[in-house]
């Protein structure tokens, strides 16, 4: 005996999402195909998309949607924006047809379609702080603080300028010319999502240390050493370091040293530090 009744059917394979591989924060649309496989026309009914939370709870993630009347053998494509704000990872999404059971069907067990939707959070790229070096010096780059909260980092690419590329969680590069260089770190995760960040390298001309002219004094006198002739082409000198041999080490732009005995004394201004490198 042939049962004369409609039969609304949805299949797991016909439940799709756009974009197919969403990133956290993307707007997501769900689409389902609804068939009438029964022997009579199906009246209009209602359907809805749900999130299954793993505790046998269904959370509505769309408005209640209208399914038009369907003739025997016909189908209808239904789409809706999905409210998945705040959710990420592997999500169990279902569409339920005839949610109020207003239609008496041949088979009531084929009204739910389910698919897994993966919403990925891109990795967080964190490069080392900006740095200042002199021409010909090597800059080191590292991304030890980059991370992916819902997976793993699988690839790191450094764009160093001049078409030079580095790979891995650290790399090095020697900058020859004075200038400002922007180095980009690109970090990829196991879902092929990526993020970028930029660190800056300031390549500056080194300061010039000038300890002053030779001096001739009597023993038992004080001598004043003056580093005021030192200069920094791109900044300001903030520290002067002196090697006074048997008199120890001192710091200061001008210092005084007592010379008790006759002799030849060599005092060296060994370092001047600037506000650029501080």
Image (cartoon, grey):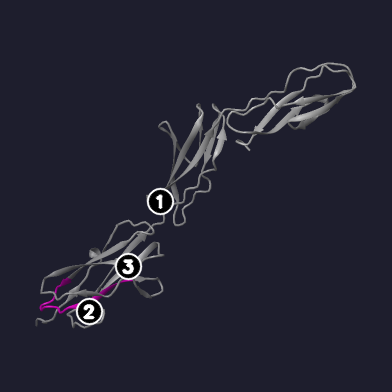
Measured from the top left, where is residue 83 in percent x and y?
34, 67
Q: Which residue is mark 2?
A: 108
Between 152 and 245, the residue placed more toward the observer is 245
Q: Quadrant of residue 42?
A: bottom left
Q: Which residue is mark 1?
A: 190
Q: Residue shown at 21%/75% (left/top)? A: 66
Looking at marks 2 and 3 on the same chain, the residue that comes earlier in the sequence is marked by: 3
Horizontal arrangement in the rendering, residue 201 relative to residue 33 (left or right):
right
* SS label for mark 1: loop
Between 229 and 182, the residue placed more toward the observer is 229
**Magenta span has 181?**
no
In this rendering, the answer to whether 96 lies above or below 200 is: below
Q: Which residue is mark 3?
A: 93
Q: Which mark is residue 245?
A: none
Measured from the top left, where is residue 73 in percent x and y?
11, 71
Q: Are marks 3 and 1 in contact (CB under 8 Å)?
A: no
Q: Is residue 165 visible from the viewing direction of this image?
A: no
Measured from the top left, where is residue 3 in percent x and y?
11, 82
Q: Which segment is the magenta one?
A: 35-50
**Which quadrant would the N terminus be assigned to in this image?**
bottom left
Horizontal arrangement in the rendering, residue 177 relative to residue 75 (left or right):
right
Looking at marks 3 and 1 on the same chain, the residue that comes earlier in the sequence is marked by: 3
Q: CA distance from mark 2 to mark 1?
A: 40 Å
In this rendering, the answer to whether 144 lies above or below 269 is: below
Measured from the top left, where is residue 159 in percent x and y?
43, 37
Q: CA distance from mark 2 to mark 3?
A: 19 Å
In this rendering, the answer to whether 130 lies above or below 252 is: below
**Which quadrant would the C terminus be assigned to in this image?**
top right
Q: CA distance from mark 3 to mark 1?
A: 22 Å
């Amino acid at each position: 005996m042939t049962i004369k009744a409609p039969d609304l059917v949805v299949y797991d394979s016909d439940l799709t999402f756009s974009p197919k591989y969403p990133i956290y924060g993307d707007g997501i649309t769900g689409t389902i195909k609804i068939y009438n496989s029964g022997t009579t026309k199906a009246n209009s009914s209602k359907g809805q998309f749900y999130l299954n939370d793993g505790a046998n709870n269904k959370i509505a993630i769309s408005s209640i949607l209208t399914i038009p009347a369907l003739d025997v053998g016909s189908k209808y494509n239904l789409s809706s924006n999905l409210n998945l704000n705040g959710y990420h990872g592997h999500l169990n999404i279902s569409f339920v047809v005839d949610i109020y059971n207003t239609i008496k069907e041949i088979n009531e067990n084929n009204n739910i379609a389910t698919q897994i939707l993966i919403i990925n959070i891109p990795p967080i790229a964190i490069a080392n702080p900006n740095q200042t070096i002199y021409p010909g010096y090597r800059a080191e780059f590292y991304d030890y603080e980059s991370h992916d909260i819902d997976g793993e980092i699988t690839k790191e690419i450094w764009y160093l300028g001049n078409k030079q590329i580095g790979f891995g969680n650290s790399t090095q590069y020697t900058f020859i010319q004075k200038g400002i260089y922007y180095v980009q770190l690109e970090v990829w995760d196991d879902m092929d999502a990526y993020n970028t960040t930029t660190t800056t390298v300031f390549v500056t001309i080194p300061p010039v240390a000038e300890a002053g002219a030779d001096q001739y004094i009597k023993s038992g006198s004080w001598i004043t050493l003056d580093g005021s002739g030192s200069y920094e082409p791109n900044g300001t000198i903030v520290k002067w370091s002196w090697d006074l041999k048997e008199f120890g080490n001192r710091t200061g732009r001008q210092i005084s040293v007592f010379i008790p005995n006759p002799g030849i004394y060599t005092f060296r201004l060994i370092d001047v530090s600037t506000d650029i490198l501080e």
